[in-house]
Image (cartoon, rainbow, N blue to C red):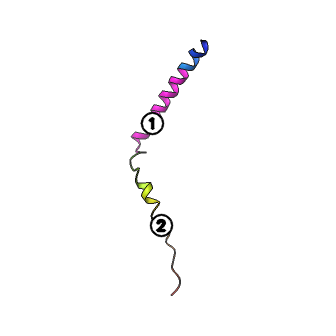
Amino acid sequence: MTVLAVLIPIALMLGVLGLAAFLWSLRHGQYDDLDGAAHRILFDDDRRPGPPR
């Protein structure tokens, strides 16, 4: 039973830490543009010169 007295507070602290990290990421805009990266991969940004004329 003494193990539970140690593990329960540790589990609660980890839960609070995870919630704090999630709220921090929400406030700093980590989830603002979810579709941008998915569409950005489809565009070819490499501007290679064509064959000489």
- Lower sequence index among marks 1 and 2: 1
Q: Residue furthest top?
A: 1
Q: Residue at x 45, y 32 (%)?
A: 20
Secondary structure mostly taken by the magenta-highlighted segment of the chain: helix
Is 37 drawn above or below residue 44 in the view shown?
Answer: above
In the image shown, does 42 or 15 lie closer to the viewer? 42
Q: Which residue is mark 2?
A: 45
* Amino acid type of the residue tagged 1 in the rendering: Phe
Tag 1–tag 2 contact (CB < 8 Å): no
User: Residue at point 45% right, 64% down?
Assistant: 43
- Magenta stretch: includes residue 45: no
Q: Which mark is residue 35?
A: none
Looking at the rendered structure, the kind of residue marked 2 is: Asp
Q: Residue at x 41, y 45 (%)?
A: 31
Q: Position of residue 44 (x, y in %)?
A: 47, 67
**How far from the left and from the top, in percent, is residue 1?**
59, 12
- Residue segment shown in magenta: 9-29
Q: Is residue 19 above or below residue 26?
A: above
Disc 1 marks which residue?
22
Residue 19: x percent and y percent?
45, 31
